[in-house]
Image (spheres, rainbow, N blue to C red):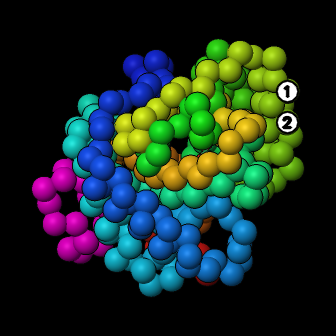
Amino acid sequence: MKVAESISRFPVVLRRGLPDNVLSFLIDLVDEMMELKITRAPKRAYRLLTDMLDLGRGDLVERLVRAAWCAPLPDVARKLLSDDPVLLITHCIVRRYEQGVSPPASPWHVDAEFLGFDQPVINFWTPLVDVGEMVPGLSFTSDRREGGYAFGTWLESVQPSGSSSDTQAFQRGRAVLRERLAPAALISPIVSAGDTLMFDQVIPHKTQQMSGAPGVRYSVELRVAGRQHLPSGYVGSVNRIAIVPDGFWEGGHGLEVIRACDMSG
Ligand SMILES: O=C(O)CCC(=O)C(=O)O
């Protein structure tokens, strides 16, 4: 596992404070994306940015990225990755999670299940409403990275090559992870709308469990890797390769958007 130890203090909250007009713009955009029907997964409480590309709505992706991937995130990513950051569009997600209405939230997992452990990938997870007290955010554990590495070690022992995350081996791995983390103390950061929670693919996490007041949680998660060091899991798990589309990004934000194109078949 080569994921840099220098980022072992994750998760951290970056005080960023997106202005109210940008927050409401992004909430409207997430609503627009959620209204688009994904026939293979009609009940999902989230949309992948690649769903938008598949529906011919690259304009929505561009609007989202322009509004959400702004200072200081590109500079922070560049420093953490020691490389030019690129956006892994296949693993960028918007969510509209309604307590008591949406399907069950994400249980314990590490993102390395689908991204691998070999190269760092940082999730910039930005709620568009305040989370952690009235509306669920994310939970981590006092076990932090060790749980993730234990999972990774286990994974490598049974999965020598990068095969699909849908295998029984992965299911068993998740069960091991959940069992290990069950007694751990929870850390559920309170994050204000427009601030950003950052963590890498080794950190075990889940949707915060919260009973009580119904609330809608809007969030945007942008997963970023180093340009020279795309994770093998990114290519292997989804059978897609990243290319930089001509003219998609016209400077000013310090980011090249990598767009996925299907290379299978
Ligand atoms: O936003 C959530 O509740 C879950 C996010 C998450 O765990 C993930 O995308 O890996």
Is 231 colored magenta in this rendering?
no
What residue did someone put label 2 on? 175
Residue 190, position in %: x, y?
51, 28
Residue 142, position in %: x, y?
64, 15
Q: Are marks 1 and 2 in contact (CB under 8 Å)?
A: yes
Q: Residue at x 44, y 84 (%)?
A: 56
Is 251 colored magenta in this rendering?
yes
Q: Farthest residue in the bottom direction? A: 56
What residue did someone put label 1 on? 179
Residue 70, position in %: x, y?
25, 49
Q: Residue at x 52, y 53 (%)?
A: 218
- State the residue in front, 138 or 115: 138
Distance of label 1 from label 2 (alpha carbons): 6 Å
Dot 2: element = helix
Q: Specify the segment rendered in magenta.
A: 242-259
Q: Give the crowd class for mark 1: few <14, some 14-19, many >=20 residues within 10 Å.
A: few
Q: How many marks?
A: 2
Dot 1: element = helix
- State the residue in front, 249 or 135: 135
Rendered-image quadrant of the C terminus: bottom right
